[in-house]
Image (tube, rainbow, N blue to C red):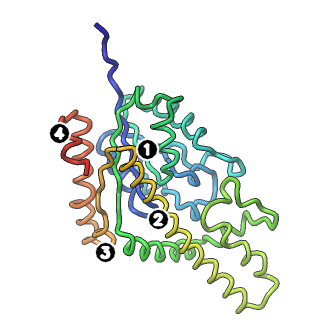
Amino acid sequence: MGTQIKKQKVIFIMGATATGKSRLSVDIAAKYSGEIINCDKMQVYRGLNIVTNKITEAEMKGVPHHLLGNIDPESDFTAQDFCYYALAVIKRIVRSGKLPVIVGGSNSFIEALVEDPFFGFRSKYECCFLWTDVSSPVLYSYVGRRVDQMVDAGLVDEVRDIYDPMADYTRGIRKSIGVPELHEYLQWETKVDHETAENLLNVAISDIKSNTCKLTDSQLSKIYRLRKELRWPIHRVDATNVFLRRGKEAEDVWEKQVLQPSLKIVRDFLNGNKNYVHHHFY
């Protein structure tokens, strides 16, 4: 009689950009002794911390993060590269008795890791998929404000530091939204009058906002496909109300409507609750 190999458990936190994935991953990892593996294909690269919106040291709250800002920015980091790196890190995390928490908006990387038969992920690991969702009109509005905050924080200077008039925007970190859009402004800012330069900058910022919103649409489409076509049991957690509040009220809504439901889903998953999928799938 064959013995069934016990699968190790892995948490995935998915969602469009700017929906609170990083915050939720830290909260879950802190609660369940986890370590986080970044799955944002631009945040894996070294540099451009503002442009790629990397989580800060303070926001990490002491939770170990992997695959965050340590890849050569000139290289092309593929889905296959991610799979090799992630699998090695997952093995180390599990061996140390911790819970792997994979977080990011690069759904193509997540799909490759889980579905590629070469890696045999499903034969070794049991997955819990969480999806932080925010209604599109609310998210678009927030994206606009966040881009303005990034500009205030030094986004333009950060891109200027790596500006190359002959740059290839199809490779490495230069594919990040915020870099190609500023090319024309950086090319002409010292060659035209102030008003023209300001207009070029405003167009670039508008394009960054627009392209980020398009990215969120693309990310959502992929999640819908994974849920509908591949039948992934992705548990949607609606964070919309958090983005409609400010200050303490927003914190309270996060706790009640996002964090506590998510912790319950993870708790049921880790405890092997047989009603886990039935209660949380749709």
Q: Position of residue 108 (x, y in %)?
A: 52, 48
Residue flagged by tag 4: what amino acid is it? Asn
As helix, strand or loop, the secondary structure at mark 4 comes to loop
As helix, strand or loop, the secondary structure at mark 2 comes to helix
- Kindly identify which residue carries mark 3: 244
Disc 4 to disc 3: CB gap under 8 Å: no
- Kindly identify which residue carries mark 4: 275
- Kindly identify which residue carries mark 2: 217
Of the two numbered discs 2 and 3 in the rendering, the one whose residue sits closer to the viewer: 2
Circle number at residue 102? 1
Of the two numbered discs 2 and 1 in the rendering, the one whose residue sits closer to the viewer: 2
Disc 4 to disc 1: CB gap under 8 Å: no
Observer-nearest of 270 and 214: 214
The local crowd at label 1, few if under 14, some if 14 to 19, many if 20 or more residues have their Cα within 10 Å, is: many
Mark 4 or 3 closer to N-term? 3
Height in image: 213 above or below 46? below
Instruction: Measure the C-alpha gap from mark 2 to mark 4.
Output: 32 Å
Residue flagged by tag 2: what amino acid is it? Asp
The local crowd at label 2, few if under 14, some if 14 to 19, many if 20 or more residues have their Cα within 10 Å, is: some
Observer-nearest of 108 and 243: 108
The quarter of the picture where residue 170 lies is bottom right
In the shown orientation, is residue 162 left or right of residue 111?
Answer: right
Residue flagged by tag 1: what amino acid is it? Ile
Screen quadrant of the N terminus: top left
Instruction: Measure the C-alpha gap from mark 4 to mark 3.
Output: 32 Å
The local crowd at label 3, few if under 14, some if 14 to 19, many if 20 or more residues have their Cα within 10 Å, is: few
x 56%, y 51%: residue? 41
The local crowd at label 4, few if under 14, some if 14 to 19, many if 20 or more residues have their Cα within 10 Å, is: few
Q: Position of residue 203 (x, y in %)?
A: 63, 82
Of the two numbered discs 4 and 3 in the rendering, the one whose residue sits closer to the viewer: 4
